[in-house]
Amino acid sequence: DVGFGKTEVAIRAASKALADNKQVAVLVPTTVLAYQHFQTFSERLKNLPCKVDYLSRARTGTQAKNALKGLKEGEVGILIGTQRILGKDVVFKDLGLLIIDEEQKFGVSVKEKLRQLKVNVDTLTMTATPIPRTLQFTFNFL
């Protein structure tokens, strides 16, 4: 549910992947959420030797090009972005963890790309849909 610490769990999972010398991709459905996660991850991980970057339509061509170069060379440890991170030009040096926020908001074509990407990569899916809330209400009445 909203406010129950999903982002904190994601940050800690990302930290573990970074400690194992793996890169992390965080896929989100909106440009605004990509920027919010970028700020949160950057702030929380500022004392660790990792670079956090993001891709979305809000980035300039130069910013996107620099992020992609750093990602391919392994300088970028965490890449946060919209479905733009599923593009053919996005090449990870060693992707180890894929974090998907609100997977139900992505279309069929995006989910097919995710299936191909998830084959050899650990995956964490987060959602704040009413399903967890409904389940909690059910447990309260038992």
Image: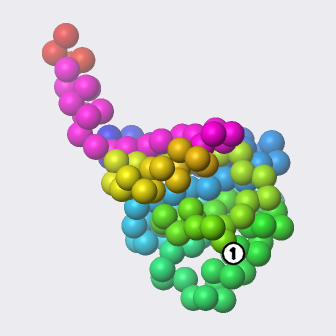
Residue 116 placed where, x, y %? 58, 47
**Between 44 and 112, the one nearer to me in the picture:** 112
Other residues around mark 1 within 10 Å, as few (<14) / some (14–19) / many (≥20): many
Which residue is located at x 63 percent, y 80 percent? 64
**Placement of the N terminus among the 4 image quadrants:** top left
Q: Is residue 128 visible?
A: yes
Residue 5 placed where, x, y %? 45, 43
Residue 130 shown in magenta? yes
Which residue is located at x 56 percent, y 62 percent? 86
Query: Is residue 62 depicted above or below 72 in this figure?
Result: below
Q: Secondary structure at mark 1?
A: helix
Residue 119 shown in magenta? yes
Q: Is residue 109 left or right of residue 12?
A: left
Residue 35 placed where, x, y %? 49, 71
Residue 65 placed where, x, y %? 69, 82
Task: Give the residue number, with chain letter if any, for mark 1.
Answer: 67
Query: Is residue 75 depicted above or below 6 in this figure?
Result: below
Which residue is located at x 51 percent, y 74 percent? 56
**Between 19 and 88, the one nearer to me in the picture:** 88
Dot 1 amino acid type: Ala
Range of residues picked out in magenta: 118-138
Q: Is residue 44 visible?
A: no
